[in-house]
Amino acid sequence: GNGEDPLETQGILEVWKDYPGMELIGGQSVVTGWDISKAQKAMAGLLAQNSQIDGIISNYGNGSTGAMQAFVQANRPLVPWAALDGMLYACTWQGLYASNPNFEMFSTTSRNWLSRNALRKGLAVVNGLDNTEPSTVNMYPTEDSTDPDMQPVCDPSLPSEAIISSRLTVEQQLDVLN
């Protein structure tokens, strides 16, 4: 459904060549249009067809919450999960972790801050100004439930759409999202 999924899937499959026991169900990503209900429906189908699912990689943490509910509804234990960060993702993990001790959670930045970098670079070009910011940036982990220093952040004062890695303060996110 988007240009990002095939490239991420290609990267995953390339890395997994060194780990022969790893496989991606169906060999490709499952398109859900970043829709929570579609993610739930897709995961329900995958769970019905596969007795063993050992982990999940998702490109939309908040959308993952629908897939998590499919596990709960199928009475299947939640498995380690990796996705882009999002408040709903972290809060849902926090609510389900106690009854699913193997439900580890990892997130990397959702990258919404990249638009700020791109805008500054574009404005510099239009205005004939130098911009020394790098054109290539490294993505970084934001949360890791297995690391005491990177525990998932669930802040009930923020809307579910808030993104911890946005580089905005809580006040700025409240202004933007409310």
Image (cartoon, grey):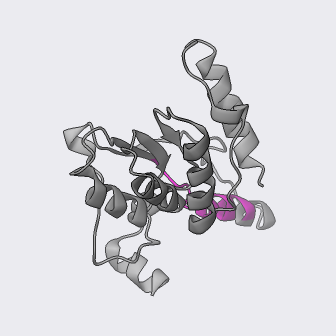
Nearest the eye: 77 or 80:
77
Relative vertical location of residue 167 with respect to residue 13 in this rendering, above or below: below
Nearest the eye: 53 or 124:
53
Compared across the picture, whether 105 is left or right of 127 comes to left
Compared across the picture, whether 33 is left or right of 18 comes to right
Compared across the picture, whether 10 is left or right of 89 comes to right
Q: Position of residue 137 (x, y in %)?
A: 58, 42
Q: Position of residue 14 (x, y in %)?
A: 67, 21
Quadrant housing residue 15: top right
Nearest the eye: 105 or 24:
24
Find out whether residue 24 is within the magenta segment.
no
Relative vertical location of residue 166 with respect to residue 16 in this rendering, above or below: below
What residue do we see at 49% from left, 56% from top?
Answer: 70
Q: Position of residue 74 (x, y in %)?
A: 45, 52
Q: Position of residue 91 (x, y in %)?
A: 33, 63
Find out whether residue 119 is within the magenta segment.
yes
Quadrant housing residue 40: bottom right
Report the predominant secondary structure element of the magenta stretch.
helix
Nearest the eye: 132 or 122:
122
What residue do we see at 67% from left, 65% from top?
Answer: 119
Across the whole image, how many numbered discs are drawn on residues? 0
Quadrant housing residue 126: bottom right
One can see residue 167 in this view = no
One can see residue 131 in this view = yes
The quadrant of the picture occupied by the C terminus is bottom left
Which residues are the magenta region?
108-122
